[in-house]
Image (tube, grey):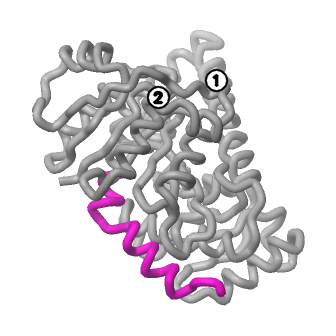
């Protein structure tokens, strides 16, 4: 049985989305139990509206919440009655708990995961790896997307290793194509860090490195994993999401501009809705934090119930397929003295 802890008070739609996601998870995954951490009264009230196996969802009361505007390290150290702190402590407490899902403050979660849960032996820095859909109806991971603003070439190599294992274990990608985010596809492009990282990735056994990637090609479908520092990765993710959202707005505006366009839109409605559903980030869960000694998944702050479910599903798949052990084994062979 996989036991997943959910910070029920994290995110903009808490506790509703977290409760809904937990119920969806126990109703769809037969060997997963959920612990919801947060305001017991609110959570139980929301749970009462659903049908589910009550033996598989429990509640741990937490009276406080960490706000996204608080300083992450201070919040984790001082707000010991918060749902996030208690979630992290519960995950840390022993092997009975396998994973944590949280849609709250990214900074506080990262601080708590690194300071309290710790890293897998051999991992220099944990990294966030979200999943995006591509135009050929596959997926692409971005590692790192915000955990580490500054990185060296060795850390970027580790991101490539961990990200590749994640795609293999959680999504069944057999031989993930790994690209390095750069200002051009040519091998000699980029600054000293990118050039050095390119050389290392090219020489690293076990990584299917296919070269540099320009940001405009992220959703093209030619890559399974993009490796970058957290600053560039965060900008890449947010600019891509923003561009897609604005394009959808333009498309909607064009479809309703006149009667002729409305007729055309009506004929294409099914295809358009399928495309919209495929591109919706809510269907892809959250950004996993690769490299921590327990599984951690960070969902978007505006996550809906279906998003929280997919975050739990991600955590379940990672645990079921032994991702942490695979990362530990792989990196121990590549440890830097």
- The residue identified by callout 1 is 249
Q: Secondary structure at mark 1?
A: helix
Residue at x 58%, y 60% (from the top left corner): 126
- The residue identified by callout 2 is 82
In this view, the residue farthest toward the top is 259
Residue 286 placement (x, y as % from top left):
48, 44
Q: Is residue 335 magenta?
A: yes
Disc number lying in front (2 or 1):
2
How crowded pointer 2 is (Cα within 10 Å; few <14, some 14-19, many 20+) is rated as many
| Residue 310, numbered label | none
Q: Is residue 217 magenta?
A: no
Q: Quadrant of residue 160?
A: bottom right
Task: Give the quarter of the figure containing the C terminus.
Answer: bottom right
Magenta span: 314-337
Above or below — where is 292 with respect to 97? below
Residue at x 32%, y 14% (from the top left corner): 42
Residue 82 placement (x, y as % from top left):
46, 28
Residue 151 placement (x, y as % from top left):
74, 64
Judged left or right of residue 196, residue 327 is left
Residue 149 placement (x, y as % from top left):
75, 54
Q: Quadrant of residue 259?
A: top right
Residue at x 62%, y 64% (from the top left corner): 125
Is any part of residue 271 visible from this angle?
Answer: no
Asked whether 308 or 325 is in front, the reply is 325
Q: Quadrant of residue 144?
A: bottom right
């Amino acid at each position: 049985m996989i036991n997943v802890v959910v910070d029920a008070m994290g995110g903009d739609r808490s506790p509703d989305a977290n409760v809904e996601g937990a119920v969806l998870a126990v109703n769809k995954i037969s060997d997963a139990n959920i612990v919801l951490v947060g305001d017991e009264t609110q959570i139980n009230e929301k749970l009462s509206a659903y049908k589910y196996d009550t033996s598989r969802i429990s509640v741990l009361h937490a009276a406080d919440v960490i706000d996204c505007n608080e300083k992450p390290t201070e919040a984790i150290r001082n707000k010991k009655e918060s749902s996030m702190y208690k979630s992290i402590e519960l995950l840390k407490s022993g092997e009975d708990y396998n994973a944590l899902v949280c849609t709250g403050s990214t900074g506080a979660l990262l601080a708590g995961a690194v300071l309290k849960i710790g890293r897998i032996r051999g991992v220099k820095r944990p990294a966030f790896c979200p999943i995006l859909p591509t135009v050929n109806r596959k997926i692409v991971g971005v590692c790192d997307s915000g955990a580490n603003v500054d990185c060296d070439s060795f850390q970027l190599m580790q991101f490539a290793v961990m990200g590749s294992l994640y795609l293999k274990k959680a999504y069944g990608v057999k031989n993930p194509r790994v690209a390095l985010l750069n200002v051009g596809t040519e091998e000699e492009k980029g600054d000293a860090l990118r050039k050095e990282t390119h050389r290392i990735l090219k020489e690293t056994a076990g990584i299917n490195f296919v070269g540099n990637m320009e940001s405009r090609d992220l959703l093209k479908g030619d890559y399974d994993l993009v490796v970058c520092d957290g600053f560039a990765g965060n900008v890449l993710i947010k600019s891509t999401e923003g561009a897609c959202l604005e394009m959808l707005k333009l498309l909607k505006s064009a479809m309703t501009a006149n009667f002729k366009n409305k007729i055309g839109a009506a004929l294409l409605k099914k295809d358009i809705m399928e495309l919209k559903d495929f591109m919706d980030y809510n269907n892809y869960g959250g950004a996993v934090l690769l490299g921590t000694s327990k599984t951690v998944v960070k969902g978007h702050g505006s996550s809906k119930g279906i998003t929280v479910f997919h975050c739990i599903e991600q955590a379940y798949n990672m645990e079921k397929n032994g991702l942490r052990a695979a990362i530990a084994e792989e990196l121990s062979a590549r440890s830097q003295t």
